[in-house]
Amino acid sequence: MINPTKADKIISGILESPNESKSIEFKPSVAWPSKIDGIQQNNKIQEIIKSILGMSNTRDGGKVILGVQRDDKEKKYLLKGMNVSDLGTYDQDLIFEHIRNFGEPEPKFQVLNIEYSNMNFIVFAIQSFIFAPIICRNNRNLSQLENAVVYIRTDKPETKKITDPSEMREVIDLAIEKELDLFSVRMQRFFKTMSGVKVLKSAKADQDKFKEELKDIK
């Protein structure tokens, strides 16, 4: 089981007034399969993986929080927390080993056991892609995931595959923006390194000149 940690201000704020958004999704308590084959018949786990892939293609990533149920009659979310038996099945290394198989490149995320209001919640904290959008890779015939598609999050909110050129353009533009940011960082490091080399060369030249002057004195 993942060691519990107290909810920070961000998670506390989300759980205090639970509402789904482009970057926030709630799921009820569910056990994580001990083997990857167990995902094949578990639609709830497949939906979690799908949301992780979709949030990976969102500018600021997102969070999938388990232990929250939707009351469709009242149209609101209720904090229930994780069942004790379900909570014990969550291991970050095991889950990453499972989920990494469904994304190309691998999605980046953390799995946290968060304590809030005397309850425990599993939080998937998902990072936005670094170099390229995450493409779904499904070679296990899972019903909730399609192979070779790109999932995104929408303002509805929902997780869906890209079907419209404008949606594809948005993801491509984000990838270009990220690449330009990385290029800028690399260039700054390059010029900083070159500046350091020039300083060293200048210092060595001054040192050599000083040695020559000492020779004249002798």
Image: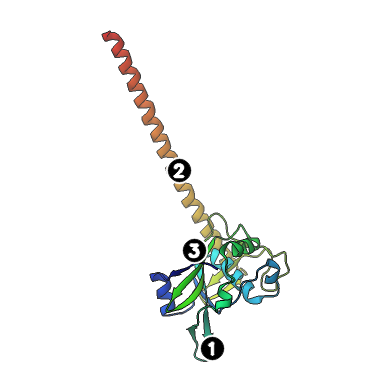
Residue annotated with mark 1: 72
Q: Provide the secondary structure element on which disc 3 rests.
A: loop
* Residue 142 relative to residue 87: left or right: right
Identity of the residue drawn at 44% across and 79% down: 118
Q: Quadrant of the C terminus?
A: top left
Distance from disc 1 to disc 2, alpha carbons, whole Å, reads 52 Å
- Where's residue 133, x and y in %? 58, 59
Identity of the residue drawn at 53% across and 73% down: 154
**Image quadrant where residue 49 sits:** bottom right
Q: Earlier in the sequence, mark 2 or mark 3?
A: 3
- The answer to the question of whether label 1 and label 2 lie on touching residues, with beta carbons closer than 8 A, is no
Q: Looking at the picture, which amino acid does disc 2 mark? A: Met
Residue annotated with mark 3: 59
**Image quadrant where residue 139 sits:** bottom right
- Where's residue 46, x and y in %? 64, 72
Residue annotated with mark 2: 187
Residue 205 shows in this picture: yes
Above or below for 130 versus 168: above
Q: Looking at the picture, which amino acid does disc 3 mark? A: Arg
Q: Provide the secondary structure element on which disc 2 rests.
A: helix
Q: Which residue is nearer to you in this view: 170 or 151?
A: 151
